[in-house]
Image: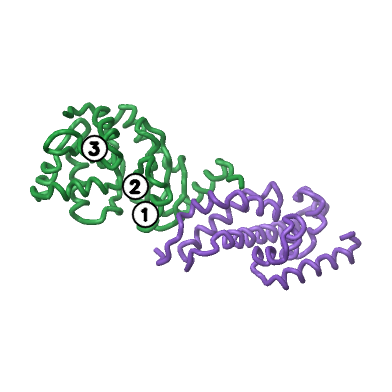
Chain colours: A purple, B green
Amino acid sequence: MSAVVLPPFWSLVEAHGGELLVHARRMTGDANGEDVLQDALLRALRAYPRLRHAEHLRAWLYRVTTTTALDHLRARRREVLTDEPPATVSEPEHYDNAFDSLIAELPDGTQAALRLRFVEDLDYEGIAARLGCSSVAARQRVSSAIRTLRRQGVPA
Amino acid sequence: MKSLPARLLDSIASAAVREGLADAVYTRLETPIGRLLIVQGERGVVRVGFPEEPVDALLAQVAARLGSRIVASDRELGNTRDVFSAYFDGDDERLDLPVDLALVRSDFRREALTLLRAEIGPGQVVTYGGLAAKVGRPRAARAVGSACATNPVPIIVPCHRVLPGGGGVGGYAGGPARKRLLLAHEGAAVG
């Protein structure tokens, strides 16, 4: 047992579960959000006894959920790439809306930054907190992604 | 902010238990003496709380002893719920459940509670002094009183069956009214 006094894990789930599900859905789509959140909360539970302090637990849960969502997106991309026949590659059935299919070809970290900026409408401070990077890096990620989309002819 | 759907909460809690990630599981059960909070660890029921006890403080108490990975699940504690329901329905009053006295603070208290549970069955009563004598400390009636007042698993460890030598029902962690109800439910003769 750890020396710090952590709140019972379920009180965090009850307090923040709803917003974490919204976050997981926005990152991975409505159909995948619940699975991703369950996976994320089990990861969090595994790591919970090793936490060295009881501060910023909400932000920590957001980070775990973000990481889990990115892993999920990576795994899904591998699935799509290895799918046969190739015709299914471009099939947008996995994606829930036009925005998702628009950014589907971008790197996962970039997709996450774009979702946080344009779907969740967060400022760069907020994006940085969720992704665990500096706000300068968050701004760079978003602006370079927009340049890439413009080059591809998307009216971003 | 909306909370998670019950179905998803259930699924997460069951997965946590299945993967050995839960230090303890809790459930809330409606009974004739109010809504009880039942917390169970790997070795057995570790805490039973009356409705007046703040849930946060109660779970924090369990977390300090068993660990903070505590989840809620009616499903995972299905058997424990059934055994409690059988007690309150009068179908089986033994409350035959594994108990973990990890929250009891001294060996004497642990010994007194263990003996009480083993020897004083439904319908029976004992005095504080009588229980002290059974533990081999006939003058320790007050210490037995403290053991009962701080009993972490009331009802299962039946402190409601311990009465003052001078008559009446005496005190109870859940209030004297509940003590009377439990005794009446078990058919014990009380003055």
First along the sequence among labels 1 and 3: 1
User: Mark on residue B61?
Assistant: 1
The residue located at (70%, 58%) in the rendering is A73
Name the quadrant of the C terminus of chain B: top left
- The type of residue carrying mark 3 is His
Q: Secondary structure at mark 3?
A: helix
Q: Amino acid at mark 1?
A: Gln
Instruction: Identify which residue is drawn at 90% across, 59% down.
Output: A155
Q: Secondary structure at mark 2?
A: strand
Out of A91 and A5, give the one closest to the viewer: A5
Give percent across and percent down for residue B26.
42, 45
Q: Which residue is mark 2?
A: B47
Q: Name the image quarter holding residue B97.
A: top left
Residue linked to disc 3? B160
Identity, as a three-letter code, of the amino acid under mark 2: Arg
Image mark 1: chain: B
Q: CA distance from mark 2 to mark 1?
A: 9 Å
Q: CA distance from mark 1 to mark 3?
A: 22 Å
Q: State which chain disc 3 sits on.
A: B
Q: Is residue B76 above or below residue A145?
A: above
Have a look at marks 2 and 3 and say if they share a chain: yes
* Label pair 2/1, CB-CB below 8 angstroms: yes
Give the quarter of the image for residue A66. bottom right
Placement of B167 over or under B68, stated as above or below: above
Q: Is residue B179 left or right of residue B68?
A: left
